[in-house]
Image (cartoon, rainbow, N blue to C red):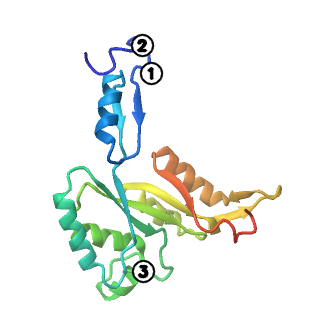
Amino acid sequence: MPLGDARGSKGDSARFCGVETVFDDNVPNIFSFNLNGGFDFLVVPLACLLPTPKETSFANYAKCLNQILQNSNNMQFWLRFPLKKSENVTETRNPDHKDEAQNDSWELWNSFRLLCEYHSQLSVALDILSSLPSASSVGRWLGEPVRAAIVSTKSFLTNAMGYPCLSKCHQSMTATFFSRSIQITSCGDFTDSDIW
């Protein structure tokens, strides 16, 4: 029976039925049970969140990750990068300003993915800090394979009612990320913040 023919009519948008599970040693049994039990698909997320490469010595890190990527079939690797741009980075590409260009996290990402041969299983998880770069800097990331945005608890403000909220710029950026199916999570120490 073709995928989705068992449920609903042709005009029904809910014709497919699936189940999501965590990846562990029991996946083959879960797969067999759910697909034989009437589900059309099984979602098992296979992603590894990697730490931000050091700006001074990331070539070896990229080389090692590239070797892993070449031997990996379906594992996704999400590399963390802070959403920042140094204020003294010039917009023009001047070869005399290589050190300044490396202060821009997008430039660092671009160099890193070049060393990883633009592998399709390599994506970005952006660390959203309390201060945001210009809209054009944020816009450059929208053309990249960003899969997650990790919002720091230090990015939250307190609204008039005393509840935590994001600034208007953060809210706008978050809405843009949601519209592009980018996963959003928060990270940080919730106990030290006055707003939590």
Q: Which amino acid does label 2 sit on?
A: Gly
Residue that carries the numbered disc 3 in the rendered image: 103
Residue in the image at 37% along x and 80% along y: 54
Disc ID at residue 102 = none
Residue 182, compared with residue 36, is above or below; it is below
Residue in the image at 69% along x and 68% along y: 191
What whole-number distance in Å separates the C-alpha atoms at marks 3 and 1?
A: 47 Å
Return the disc, 1 or 2, that comes first in the chain's sequence: 2
Disc ID at residue 14 = 1
Q: Which of the two discs, 2 and 3, sits closer to the camera?
A: 2
Crowd tier of the residue under label 3, counting other residues whose Cα lies within 10 Å: few below 14, some 14–19, many 20 or above: some
Residue 30, compared with residue 85, is above or below; it is above
Farthest-out residue, right: 161
Give the quadrant of the C terminus: bottom right
Return the disc, 3 or 1, that comes first in the chain's sequence: 1
Residue that carries the numbered disc 2 in the rendered image: 8
Crowd tier of the residue under label 2, counting other residues whose Cα lies within 10 Å: few below 14, some 14–19, many 20 or above: few
Whether residue 63 is visible here, answered yes or no, is yes
Q: Which amino acid does label 3 sit on?
A: Asn
